[in-house]
Structures are given as structure tokens and as C-alpha cells.
Image (cartoon, rainbow, N blue to C red):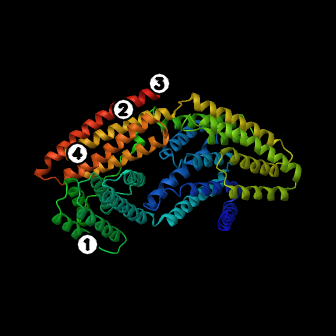
Amino acid sequence: MDKGSLVKKSAFFIAICLFVGMFSSIFGEENSLVGVTVVVLALMMFGKDLSVKPLWNLGGLLAIMLSMGLGSYASLLNPFLGVPINLVIVFLTSYCTTRNLRTPLHFPFLLGYAFLLSVPVSPEELDTRIAALVTGSVLIVALNVLVNRKTREGTSHGIIITVCGHVKDCIKGVRENGTHDTTALNTYCAESDAVMRDRLNTLFFTESRDRRVLETRTSLQNLGNAVCEGGCPDGLLRNLESLMGIVESFEKGESDASEVSDAVDRILSSHGCGYPVVSSLRLLQSSLTDPEKPPIEPVKNTLINDFRTDSLGFSFGVRMAILFTFCVFVWQYYGLDNAQWMLYAIVALVQPYTDSSWKKATHRMTGTLMGVILFVIVCLTMGSDPIALGATVLILGYVYMLVDPKRYDVMMMFITAMVLTGSVMADPMGDAVTERIAYTLLGVVLATASNYLLLPYRMRDENIELCMRYLKTARRGLDDVVNGRDPMETAMIITESSGISRKLHMNCPDDPVMGRFLAEQDGLMAEIRLLKTMYGHMDGDDRDEFLKRMAGAERRLEKNRRTASDVLMDMMG
């Protein structure tokens, strides 16, 4: 670790400690864990741009936080009253926050809810807790807006500039070698599709100017693929390379759209371009020069579409809600001290996928045991001196942040040692330590059992579902081409398919049958994108070439269906 990283991490650790301390001093010790929850949520939500509609996002976050605050208070009034309250809150939180498994937000929200249940407040203190939750929500959104305020502009222009660079590479490769592999271009465009898809889920690309971004990116990708098909004379390739420089200049704010349009007109009037090149250039020209474009319709709400028993979000939500509610009921009904530690283990170990649950449970138990050993060493060394123990907790936290362990068992070792040391400071003469260890291990057993017995959802199930969805998106895309629908509707179907493809590549990196299916299906989706561009700018003389390509796409889809059957048989067999 270099000196700069050491200074940054040290300053970051100090800032977190100061924030939690300040939060506790303002809202009371009973809300200190609310401050911890705010820090965790703020850090994990940096990857989601809340600056697009900050008031809307603040309203949504306030609804979740206040439901957790009021729900935790009401559920502790009576164990039986808590059953329906906890079932609803935990299910909805789990279901709604597993949409993006790259950044699963169910953990910080559910851990925060467990914290609120662990530190109840009196009726007189409820107002302060609500104020703490509201303040925390405002701080989360404000910090996110501050960090991401220029992300939208930078992402939009950056995507187009990068695609221009890939098209230049295609042109250079064709000029030097007669051909060029389009993998780098299409892979980057698929990644940018994922960025656009995430933003569409938050109603980002819903204005007329946002439509320009998607149209421009689509036209450039089509142009790159058309160039790599071959047949372009060298003079045309040189002019296309120059055009890419003009587009880059426009995206950087160094020129205006008229220069791009004029360059396109010169190319079309000077060269006998193939139809795929012509249609791509016309789409590029219209995307930059048409004054008014209708906005893109927001992405359909997949939360409603996935509300079925065989979906990942539903099965995980039911599993977490039932086990969470059961543990809270037993804890409250029998008045078990320290039983909340069972709850913490359940929140950490109940997983969306069954495949990863056993490994994570093993790491949790191993890390807990290592943390207990480290805790015993601390106690033998420091005794029960609260000052020495407090300093030890800070040192452990500081080392943990510097090391930044990626292994879950090492992470649990530090967390267990810090928490147990803190518990001795709070209750040096009690048996809290033994009970907390026992409840943690019991939570590990219950969470692992529920992952395998209660609506288990394996990655194989998701892969089967995604393969079927990928084929359906291709069918919808071809139907949209034939029916002459809005090109952006087809573009959004292809954008959705890119997310499916990326997830399948992630789930099955070494499966040759799946790899063959994805290679063919990805190529088909690129062809559908080009067909839609051709259809939108087709003259009578171009109809034969369009129909020939359309027939070829239909044959490719049927071939991919047969390959998908092999994939599914291999998964089920």
C-alpha cells in the first residue's frame, strides 16, 4: 500500500468515526446504529445515480426508512402483532432490492432493520428516531447527488466518444488487413447497454435529448459492424475515419451538429456506399439534427412481471421474510437476551442463490471462530479496562479498513472480534459473550437450512429462465422490425438482451455449449439492430437486400432455439 492510499483510508476511517459519534451525540446513543446504517447505505448506493430525480429518490428512500422505523416500533409492542408487520416489511425490502445483484442492497437495509429491532425506543423517543431516519435519508441522497452530479453528462458523451474510437479501430483493421473482429466494439456496446438499462430503470433516458444518445450510439455500432463486413473502398474508409473525429469533436463541445451533418452529406454524395453503411449514416445524421424527438418510454416495471413463485426476487423474499419473522417472534415472545445475534447471522447468510449459501456459511463459522480466538487474546492481554478495550476496538477497526479483506472469513474474524470486545465493555461481568457466540452459530445453521429447504433457487434455474427470455427478446425484436415499430422500442429490446447476455456470461464462464449459444445469439441481436436501422431508411431498390437479411435472421433464430435446447438438456441432465 502506497503512502497516498494509507492517508486516504486513514482519513476515511476518521471521517466515519466522527460522523457516527456526531450522529449519536445529536440523536442519542439509542440511535447510534441508525448512524452506522446510514454510513453503510451511503457507501453501497454510490453505484446508483440518485442525482437524476433526487426528490423522487429521496421520497422512495424516506418511505423505506420510515416504514422500517415505524414497523420496528409497532412490531415490538406485541410479538403476534410483529408477525404480519415483519413479514410484509422484510419481504418487500428483500424483493425490491435484489433487482441488481452486482450491488445487492438487501443486506444494508435488512441489517438496519435488525438494528432498529435490537435497540427499541420508548414512545417519548420515537420522534427522535424518526428525525434520525429522515436526516439520514437526506444525507444519503445529498452525498450521492454531490458525487454523481456530473455522471449523466460524462457517461453519455463518454460512451459515444469511446464507440467512435472502436469504429476507428474497425476502419484501421479493415484498411490494413481487409477485415477486423468486431468483438471489442460489440462488447463495449453491450456494457454501455447495461449502463443505459440501469438508468432507464430510474427513468433516466426519458427525455427527447436522451433519445439522441441511444440513437447516436446505435448508429455508430451499426456503422462499425457494416465496415467490418467488407466491400468499402479505401477512400470511403478514410472519410469515415475523419467523420468519427468530427463526431468526437461534437461530443466534446468543440463543434456543432451541422458539421457532422455536412460531413455525412459529403460522404453519401461522393461514394457508392453499401446499404448498411448508408442506413447507419442516415440514422447518425437524424439523431443529431432532428430538432424534436419523442421521448423514450420508460422501461416496463419488472417488479410486477417477476412477482411469481419461480422468480429469484420472490423466492428470496419469502425465504428471508419467514426466517427473519420467526427469529424475531421467538426472540421477543420468550424474552431471550442477545438473540438478535441470531438475526444478524440470518441477514448475512440467507442468500438469493442456494449455490453460494454453504460456502458462505462455512466462511461465517470459520471467521466467527477465528474472531473468538482473537477476542480471547485481547481479553487476556487487556483485562476488563474499558479504556484499553475501547482503544482496541478502534485499532481493530482501523486495521480492518487498511487491510480491506476480500475473503468473507477474514472479514468475519475482524467483525466478530470488534463486536465481542465491545460487548465486554458494555457488560464485563455478564455471560453475553457466550450467548452471542451460541446465537450466531444457531443463526448460521438456520440460514443454511432455509437456503436449501425453503423455496431454494439455484443458479441453474436462473440460467434456464434467462435463456428462454433471450430467445423471446430476439423474437420480439424481429417482430418489431417487420411491424415497423418505433426504432427505439427495438433498441430497448436489444438493450435488455445485452443485460441478459452479460448475466449468462457471468453465470457460465466455462460452459462451451452456453458459450456457443451466446455467441450466436449476441450476433443475431446485432443483426436485428442493423435490420431495424435499414428498415427505417429503406428505399425501393434496397428491399431485396433487406428481405434477404431478414430471412437469414429468421434461420439464425431457429438454429439458436436448437442450441438452447442442448443447453437446457445439459443443465437438467
The residue under the point 84% across, 48% down is 377
Q: Earlier in the sequence, mark 3 or mark 2?
A: 2
Q: Where does residue 137 sit, x and y in percent of width and height?
A: 55, 58
Above or below — where is 308 with respect to 18?
above
As rendered, which of 356 and 284 lies closer to the eye? 284
Looking at numbered disc 1 in the image, what kind of residue is underneath it?
Glu
The residue wearing badge 3 is 573
Q: Earlier in the sequence, mark 4 or mark 3?
A: 4
Above or below — where is 382 with respect to 271?
above
The residue wearing badge 2 is 563
Above or below — where is 535 with respect to 235?
above
Q: Earlier in the sequence, mark 2 or mark 1?
A: 1
Q: Residues within 10 Å of mark 3 (few under 14, many from 20)?
A: few
Q: Where does residue 514 sit, x and y in percent of width and height?
A: 43, 36
In three-dimensional space, the C-alpha distance between marks 2 and 1, rounded to whole angstroms, equals 46 Å
Looking at numbered disc 3 in the image, what kind of residue is underneath it?
Gly
Q: Which SS class for mark 3?
A: loop
Is disc 4 in contact with disc 3, using a CB cutoff of under 8 Å?
no
Q: Earlier in the sequence, mark 4 or mark 1?
A: 1
As rendered, which of 311 and 493 lies closer to the eye? 493
In three-dimensional space, the C-alpha distance between marks 4 and 3, rounded to whole angstroms, equals 37 Å
The residue wearing badge 1 is 259
The residue wearing badge 4 is 481
In three-dimensional space, the C-alpha distance between marks 3 and 2, rounded to whole angstroms, equals 15 Å
Which one is closest to the eye, mark 4 or mark 2?
Answer: 2
